[in-house]
Image: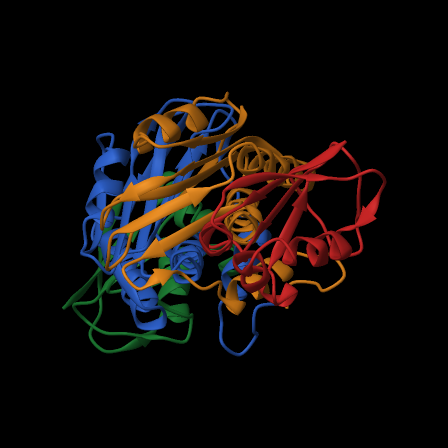
Chain colours: A blue, B orange, C green, D red
Amino acid sequence: MFEAEVRRAPFDVAAAHARLSALGPGVGAVVLFTGQVRDEPLFLEHYPGMAERQMAARIAEARARWPLLGALAIHRFGALDVGELIVLVGTASAHRAAAFESAAFLMDWLKTSAPFWKRGRAGWVEARASDDAAARRWLPSKGEG
Amino acid sequence: MFEAEVRRAPFDVAAAHARLSALGPGVGAVVLFTGQVRDEPLFLEHYPGMAERQMAARIAEARARWPLLGALAIHRFGALDVGELIVLVGTASAHRAAAFESAAFLMDWLKTSAPFWKRGRAGWVEARASDDAAARRWLPSKGEG
Amino acid sequence: MTVRLLYFAWVREMVGAEAEQLPLAEPLPLGELVARLRARSEGHARALAEPARLRAAVNQDFAGWDALVRPGDEVALFPPVTGG
Amino acid sequence: MTVRLLYFAWVREMVGAEAEQLPLAEPLPLGELVARLRARSEGHARALAEPARLRAAVNQDFAGWDALVRPGDEVALFPPVTGG
């Protein structure tokens, strides 16, 4: 089960976990990351088509890099209140290292390559250099530094 | 919300996520790890008292090391079938790096310091050197290597 | 032949449109295409003034300013992404 | 005064008990306490033969073989942990 989904409606964390957990007797570890609206309501604009395409591409990269039994990425758009979930990334593997690392990889790369833009009360949110740095640490030429 | 729990009965992943997610408007990231029985049924023996104590100590260490808004560790004991959840670690923070790193830290140290022992069909499971290595990478003197 | 142009976030707001067409007879580097677009309106000029503040995609993949845009392509211009 | 002893996993199985008492009048290094325990039975001798295969806790914290055990302490002997 390798899936990317872009949607306006809320998603179900328990269902995502259950799907990853049920991928067979080889699953020993599931990691779920969820990102949620912090401090003030947000509006999320996205590029339909490219968003799904980039998320699916990151999942394919993670799958090539770690021995995954499943990976899931869900990203919402539209108006979201404080505390609402924006994004979910989930991975399933035999062992925890692959599940943790691939989930962190997926989030770091979604942050810098999935075409979503946040607007808060003060206007469009600026991209952060720390997000580019987080993604770059996964490039083979640069190592994990 | 910083809690460690040892129990025989199944635990509720959705409830754990909901509690971490609801820790206030400062929460931006939640990471959940679950470990489950792989390949063959297991029996988990534990040292009551020390298990809770060690898990709580690891949570206190994580809290001192990362800016966490909450952390949760639940570990089951007794007879568990393939696919059943054994352990859950969850963390909540403003940003994803702290949530990911502290959850990985907690799992690595629970693996080597929480007094649980797995017995499978072939007898008691042997400890793995790779688990010791995973825990050691968090020691300040050794760095992240 | 044309190129389909898409704008997002503050680029969309400054340009004053979310999509438009640009006639294109033959392949053109993305940077030159953007230079042409600046002449369309004051909004275009302002939104596209600083390529360093922009990112671009050609056919839904990220592309650099030297990438060749071909007639029929879909080109999107937007700020660095901030989702997740 | 006594020390409360606890055994887990295959140590418990080989010793043939999950808990027992050891009389102790004054502090003793954990390694010497284990040496004393080996004399209790063949099972003890076998279970505790190789300290490198064992881990120990004193009062529910991990302890090395040179740690001092005091009358009234709780001492646990077990294999390296394999939970998680």
Residue in front for this viewpoint, A38 or B120? B120
The location of residue B73, given as percent across then percent down, is 48, 36
- Looking at the rendered image, the quarter that the C terminus of chain B falls into is bottom right
> Number of numbered discs present?
0
Is residue B61 left or right of A83 when viewed as pictured? right
The location of residue D1, given as percent across then percent down, is 77, 31
Residue in the image at 49% along x and 62% along y = B127
Residue in the image at 37% along x and 25% along y = B18
The location of residue A134, given as percent across then percent down, is 54, 57
Residue C59 in which image quadrant? bottom left
Q: In the figure, D36 relative to C1: above or below?
A: above
Residue B8 in which image quadrant? top left
Residue D24 in sight from this viewpoint: yes
Residue in front for this viewpoint, A109 or A22? A22
Q: In the figure, C73 relative to B106: above or below?
A: below
The location of residue A138, given as percent across then percent down, is 49, 67
Residue in the image at 50% along x and 37% along y = B91
Residue in the image at 31% along x and 72% along y = A64
Identify the residue at the far right of this view: D26
Q: In the figure, D61 relative to A36: above or below?
A: below
Residue in front for this viewpoint, A46 or D80? D80
Residue C17 in sight from this viewpoint: no
Residue in front for this viewpoint, B129 or B32? B129
Identify the residue at the far left of this view: C1
Is residue B43 left or right of A105 when viewed as pictured? left
